[in-house]
Image (spheres, coloured by chain):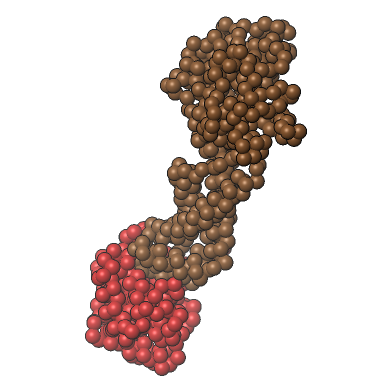
Amino acid sequence: MLKNYILTAWKVFLRRKFFTFINLFGISLTLSVIMVVSTIVENYLYPSGPEQTSGNYRVVERLTLSTEGHSNTYGGRLGYKFIKDNIFRLNSPELVSINTGSFSISLFHKDKKHEKQFRRTDANYWSILKFNFISGRNYTQEEVENGLFVAVVSSDVEQSLFENESAIGQFITVNSQRFQVIGVVENVSAVERNAAADVWVPFTTTPSTEYKQQNMGSWEAILYHSDSSMLSEIHKEYVNLLKNDLILEHSDGMTLAYSGAFSKLENVARGGFGDEYSYDSNVEVLIALMTVSIVAFMLLPSINMINLNVSRILERSSEIGVRKAFGASASQLVLQFIVESILITLAGGVFGVVLSFFLLDIVEQSGLIPYAEFSFNLRIFLWGLLMVLLFGLISGVYPAMKMSRLNPVAALKGGA
Amino acid sequence: MLKLTKISKTFQTDKIETIALQDIDLHIKQGEFVSVMGPSGCGKSTLLNIMGLLDEPSDGDIKVNSQAIESYKDKHITHLRNEKIGFIFQSFHLIPDLKVIDNVELPLLYRNVPAKERKRLAIEALEKVGLKPRTGHYPTQLSGGQQQRVAIARAIVGKPELLLADEPTGNLDSRMGDEIMKLLESLHKNDNATIVMVTHDEEMAKRTERTIRVFDGQLVH
């Protein structure tokens, strides 16, 4: 039976070349866009670079300080003082690391200026994030405490500044500060935003000590635990501290602090949809929005395909009439047309996957996301397959049901 | 074999009600070759569709082998059609995307007959209509007469008890029409097939055992 369905489907596809092309084009384009977006999201949420340990840490990225009654509010990234006074008092994380976030700097070498990303960190940063060292080493706790002017650079910096030489032992100048390179790491994709930079130096080399008095600033804190089930405890303890044991000095009358220790997705949600006077990320809103977007994005071509399928199937009403006359039940006809629909969506899916490879390559080469290397894994493939089947079902079921209900006499006459 | 009692059929379109058949009483006996004649639009094809369980009457009873048709629900009726009735249409209605043999196998496909057995029976049916060498062809590669013979092979492959032919020679020239008629006659004689054939052609009707005449939706005696 299935062989007969497949055979008929194949012949129909060949006979109706333009229709087949339109269908394949619509399906493959839709799927490739979804696959590309989901690959980027997948690589963001499940990174394979230094942030591969992201399942074992939470990041505090944002903070809102406010007066009672919220008449005066500051919102943004954290200051060093706030981290030191509050986050360093948390007991549940095994490790706490702080860094300034990355920012653009002009890096001078041999009178040449290079625009690069720069980040100041502590020593724990290297224990939590798994950088791949090409040569040299990271800076130690002792070097951070002593404020030594040492730096770890990316392989891109090594190549662009020192060409064929090793960067180890060489000096680079950033904002009049001279750092000696002690380590070279593989380039980090910009999607790994807690790790990405070109130059990393100890935070104690900051030119001014003013940062030590600031509750708001450009810092972020990474809270690590080897047992991932402890991460929610970390968030709870942090929120509890903010509510009941907050230390806020030099705060211009601010007495309330709202923040949270969040996963990557939660931090995106907090930034986009979070209530600034809340301790939650509102990640549910982001997930709902993403789901609705994907469904809406798939729905439009699905409706188009439903239309195409209905008109295509009605053209075959005589065949439906014959099949009914010779004993095909409604369910058998529904199955036949769903098989056809799934076959064409699977073919479109194959094209879509191939197209996704090309599109991802273009995104990687474009430099739109610096150092991005998107890997296609089994999870994305299975997601893609699920999307294809869903697409096939959505666009096949309604037309199949509609035509299976055709009156055989009317169908034989070629009418609906 | 087939008994129609007080069969009526009314078509409702918007506010217009058209009576296609009225109080038809008809008994088709096992092994009979019956022709149905009448002017265009008199209800011949409607009658044939009702006999073939393709259409539901507005009123009246149908008995197939003394068993009354009580339900026109999809499963029950499709099963009956598949097992008991074979159709031959004026415009052949072969599926253009399927080869001759796949077209002939169609009724067996819905009977869940295994592939090998399907093929054997289809070749046997094609042999009967003289088209065994054409099994691998597509319908469009055949002449009108050959297409109708394939349609007859499809109608008889499942060995149905009743063959319903709706103007089977209507789209053919007289020579090919004669060939098809001879084929139906041989199926009737050799296989004792029960055949009901709608026709406009008085000569063809004369070759059947009994002619039923329909006028304005009623049988004329």
User: How far from the left and from the top, in percent, is residue A210?
Assistant: 72, 12
Q: Does any portion of residue A220 appear in the rendered image?
A: no
Looking at the picture, does residue B94 appear above or below residue A324?
below
Q: Residue furthest right?
A: A111
Above or below for B169 versus A162: below
Q: Which residue is nearer to you in this view: A230 or A205?
A: A205
Where is residue B109, by image quadrant?
bottom left
Residue under the image location 39 percent in, 85 percent down: B146
Which residue sits at x=58%, y=26%? A182
Report whether A386 appears left or right of A373.
left
Please indicate whether residue A325 sits to the left or right of residue A137 in the image.
left
Q: Is residue A392 visible?
A: yes
Q: Colour of chain B?
A: red
Q: In the depicted view, which residue is nearer to us: B46 or A300?
A: A300
Vertical comparison of B127 with A290: above or below: below
Shown in brown, the chain is: A
The residue at 62%/47% (across/down) is A365
| Residue A238, picture quadrant | top right
